[in-house]
Amino acid sequence: MIQYTPFDCGVTWDSYLADLRSFDWHANVAEWDFPDEKRVLRVRFFGSVIVRILDDFALSTETDPAEWKGLVRDHFAYLVEGDAFHAAQSEGWKSVEGPTQHYRFLTGNACMDVVCSRPPTFETVEV
């Protein structure tokens, strides 16, 4: 079973209308467009991270959706437990980083998985 635990990222939106705008691999910062296109949600990750960006359709081919528990309609940010992506990461890397957690961000067009040892921060920015 894959457990999704929704968490508050400080915005209220229909996440299926949002889209991943960019990911800065040097700064570990992702930005998602708001549906109104006047703001972006900036998510910052700290320390070493492992990131995967894919079309959300690929998730249904990786694991059986019947095993997904805790998803909330139109919710964006989740802490994920029991998923193969986190399990596949190097045990050596995870032990050096300390306890790591798997975060998943879902929109209508993309999914971004992040494994890191510290929670991300969220900021809304006018564009």
Image (cartoon, rainbow, N blue to C red):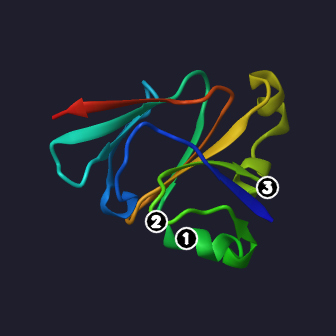
- Crowd class of label 3 (few under 14; some 14 to 19; many from 20; radius 10 Å): some
Q: Position of residue 47 (x, y in %)?
A: 60, 21
Name which residue lies at 37% across and 64% down.
Answer: 16
**In the rendered image of this protein, does residue 86 appear above or below residue 45?**
below
Q: Position of residue 115 (x, y in %)?
A: 65, 39
Q: Amino acid at mark 2?
A: Asp
Camera-side mark, 3 or 2 = 3
Q: Check contact, mark 1 vs mark 2: CB within 8 A.
A: yes
- Element assignment for label 3: loop
Identify the disc placed on residue 55: 2
Give the mark nearest the N terminus, 3 or 1: 1
- Element assignment for label 2: loop
The tally of labels here is: 3
Identify the disc placed on residue 90: none
Instruction: Pick whichever, 116 or 2, lies toward us.
Output: 2
Q: Amino acid at mark 1?
A: Ala
Q: Check contact, mark 3 vs mark 1: CB within 8 A.
A: no
Place residue 2 in its image quadrant: bottom right
Give the mark nearest the N terminus, 3 or 2: 2
Identify the disc placed on residue 58: 1
**In the rendered image of this protein, does residue 48 appear above or below residue 34?**
above
Instruction: Pick whichever, 33 or 116, lies toward us.
Output: 33
Name which residue lies at 67% across and 75% down.
Answer: 65
- Crowd class of label 1 (few under 14; some 14 to 19; many from 20; radius 10 Å): few
- Element assignment for label 1: helix
Name which residue lies at 33% across and 38% down.
Answer: 41
Q: Check contact, mark 3 vs mark 2: CB within 8 A.
A: no
Q: Position of residue 89 (x, y in %)?
A: 75, 44
Identify the disc placed on residue 82: 3
Quadrant for the C terminus, please.
Answer: top left
Q: Amino acid at mark 3?
A: Gly
